[in-house]
Amino acid sequence: MNIIYGVAPVLEALRSGRRSIRRLIVAAGANQERLRSVIEAAQRAGIACETRPRRELDDLARRANHQGVIAELAASAKRSTYVDPEEILGAAQEQPLVVLLDGIEDPHNLGAILRTCEGAGVDGVFIPAHRAAGITETVAKTSAGAVEHLRIAQVTNLVPLILDLQERGYTVVAVEGNGTKTYSDLDMRGALALVFGSEGRGVRRLVREKCDLAVSIPMLGRVNSLNVSVASGVVLFEAMRQRRRGVAS
């Protein structure tokens, strides 16, 4: 059974309409006021709402924190999680901003990054199809429903994608600890692709070599790096600041 659980992820799935929801399952005795917006959204969409003992929801969510609500997806809904890469690359934007994630393995990190991407107005996210976390119930929950509003594409190899982006006029920038430039000194206006590496290895060498340049986040403490989800927030909201103001400093 394909499911989404948690108040925010289920509500955003209902609002976006991108995935077909078969039914809503609510835990008996759950806080109805907290779930009111979810239930009302399901009713407006004509989706059946069933009440079940909480232990049944615990089993369906594999003991994860479902917050008293689970949406069961139709059999074909999982396929609509990802979009074709061309849906991102072909989108007409004056100064497009895309994110490439090079092997993020922790689903909680992936969910947090996607939440940041949605909040920063990213036009699309690319993730590898292999040796990386995909979009799961945990990722959807951690993203607080952001996966329902983002264009997310899976690609076999990031290197050909980077070359394609460069041909389309994008500046491709790796974010890593030993970058040659401070992230805030980078002009982030125009067509921009930001590459964030995995939790342990960072951006892989072959991927880094194809990027136009690398930037880093200055660190003053004894710990020499940030969690990748935190680093993505720092850099993406600087990009948003520059683009909204129309200046690079």
Image: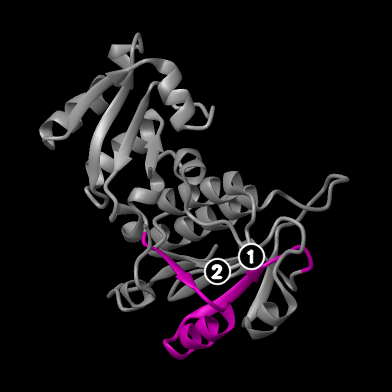
Q: Amino acid at mark 2?
A: Pro
On-image quarter of the N terminus? top left
Residue 33, compared with residue 205, is above or below; it is: above
Position of residue 172 relative to residue 183, above or below, is: below
Left or right of residue 77: residue 43: left
Q: Which residue is mark 2?
A: 128
Residue 41: horizontal and vertical position, in percent?
A: 19, 31
Residue type at mark 1? Arg
Q: Is residue 173 visible?
A: yes
Q: Which span of residues is magenta-colored?
A: 151-178
Q: Quadrant of residue 104?
A: bottom right
Q: Residue furthest bottom?
A: 167
Q: Nearer the viewer, residue 200 or 71?
A: 71
Q: Does residue 35 sit above or below 200 in this rendering?
A: above
* 10 Å crowding of disc 1: few (<14), some (14-19), many (20+): few
Q: Position of residue 149 (x, y in %)?
A: 33, 51
Callout 2–callout 1 Cβ contact below 8 Å = yes
Q: Quadrant of the C terminus?
A: bottom right
Residue hosting label 1? 131
Q: Residue at x 50, y 60 (%)?
A: 239
Check if residue 202 falls in the magenta segment: no
SS category of the residue bearing label 1? loop
